[in-house]
């Protein structure tokens, strides 16, 4: 790992051939801080954003696609919408919509972060490969106390690969986690906001021969137990490298790691995109929104401001 970013940001793919498993380990540090920084979210909201980004990254990097993977949670709770997307190149961003007063009132809510913050709603996964590519979407109800629980529910109902996921984060000096059958344990809150995700999946080829799945089932249960022994402290500690952690968990079965993939914060907003959006509305309607002769458009993902004065608006519509 580099000296300037000792915690990542990265995805570490791996395989455990003896157990018929593949997996991904995601770590987010500087990218997470860059995403959270401009917004000033309440601590619980920031924690949910951190876990959503880690979950989006770990799911996206288990797929082969050329485009954008989007994870969206939407409910009737004080945190009404939570979106994170990841491109195939590792560019990440996030958007959240919430009611600050209701978030404060729900501070002591029981039942986990999903029921108290998101409430009843749905979780969706979308792969958009552009106008010439195939589009895929999966959706499930928000079932469970944590985002990891909701993801488990999706994989169970979809009939896809058996999957186990752990999500942990540290925000404002505290460690929050949700994983396989419970909360992450331990923690290391020093060094700013961090998040991590660990996922294993049972490959279809791991099914038992002749319809007898008992040996493969036993291997899967063993792998989940080993994965569950990972602590939040290990997952979030920059002194524990990804390969060291994976070796500690799975060395008896011969874990094989592959080249890490970089992750980064990169919003896709631009002056040209904002200008195109403005031109879709009547000029008089846009000019009516001006304050002190200037129309300001703020990107909800990165909080970048795009300002158009009277001259810029005139030129914009003349060009259109």
Image (tube, rainbow, N blue to C red):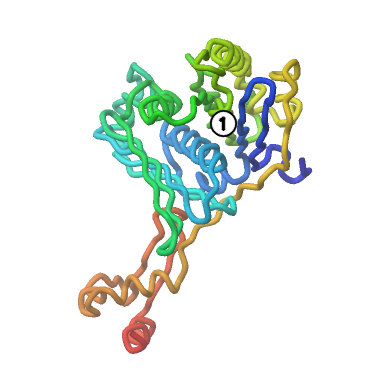
Residue 143 visible in the current orientation: yes
Secondary structure found at label 1: strand
Looking at this view, is 164 or 97 the one in front? 164
Residue lying furthest front in this view? Answer: 210
- Above or below residue 160? Residue 1 is below
Q: Residues within 10 Å of mark 1 (few under 14, many from 20)?
A: many
Quadrant of the image occupied by residue 14: top right
Residue at image position (49%, 56%) is: 67
Residue 64, x across and y down, in percent:
55, 47
- Above or below residue 4? Residue 206 is above
How many numbered circles are shown? 1
Which residue was labeled with disc 1?
A: 197
* Quadrant assignment for the N terminus: top right
Tell me if 294 is positioned left or right of 201 in this view: left
Residue 35, x across and y down, in percent:
52, 47
Residue 234, x across and y down, in percent:
67, 22
Residue at image position (58%, 36%) is: 193
Looking at this view, is 231 or 22 the one in front? 22
Tell me if 113 is positioned left or right of 171 in this view: left
Tell me if 24 is positioned left or right of 128 in this view: right
Tell me if 74 is positioned left or right of 187 in this view: left
Residue 186 visible in the current orientation: no
Quadrant of the image occupied by residue 33: top right
* Quadrant assignment for the C terminus: bottom left
Residue at image position (60%, 50%) is: 264
Residue 253, x across and y down, in percent:
72, 18
Residue at image position (29%, 39%) is: 80
Residue lying furthest bottom in this view? Answer: 318
């Amino acid at each position: 790992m580099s000296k300037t970013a000792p915690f990542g940001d990265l995805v570490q793919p791996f395989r455990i051939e003896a157990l018929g498993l593949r997996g991904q380990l995601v770590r987010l540090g500087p990218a997470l801080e860059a995403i959270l920084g401009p917004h000033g979210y309440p601590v619980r909201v920031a924690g949910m954003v951190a876990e959503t980004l880690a979950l989006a990254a770990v799911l996206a990097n288990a797929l082969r696609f050329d485009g954008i993977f989007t994870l969206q949670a939407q409910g009737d709770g004080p945190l009404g919408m939570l979106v994170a997307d990841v491109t195939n190149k590792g560019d990440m961003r996030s958007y959240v919509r919430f009611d600050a007063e209701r978030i404060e009132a729900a501070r002591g809510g029981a039942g986990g972060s999903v029921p108290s913050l998101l409430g009843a709603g749905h979780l969706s996964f979308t792969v958009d490969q552009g106008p010439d590519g195939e589009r895929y979407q999966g959706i499930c109800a928000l079932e469970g106390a944590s985002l990891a629980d909701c993801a488990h529910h999706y994989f169970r109902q979809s009939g896809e690969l058996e999957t186990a996921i752990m999500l942990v984060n540290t925000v404002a000096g505290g460690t929050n986690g949700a994983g396989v059958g419970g909360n992450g344990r331990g923690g290391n809150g020093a060094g700013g906001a961090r998040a991590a995700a660990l996922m294993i999946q049972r490959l279809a080829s791991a099914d038992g021969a002749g319809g007898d799945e008992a040996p493969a089932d036993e291997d899967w249960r063993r792998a989940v137990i080993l994965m569950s022994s990972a602590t939040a402290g290990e997952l979030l500690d920059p002194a524990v490298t990804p390969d060291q952690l994976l070796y500690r968990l799975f060395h008896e079965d011969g874990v094989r790691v592959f080249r890490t993939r970089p992750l980064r914060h990169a919003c896709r907003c631009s002056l040209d995109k904002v200008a195109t959006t403005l031109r879709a509305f009547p000029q008089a309607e846009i000019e009516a929104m001006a304050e002190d002769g200037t129309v300001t458009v703020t990107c909800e993902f990165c909080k970048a401001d795009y300002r158009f004065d009277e001259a810029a608006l005139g030129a914009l519509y003349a060009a259109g």
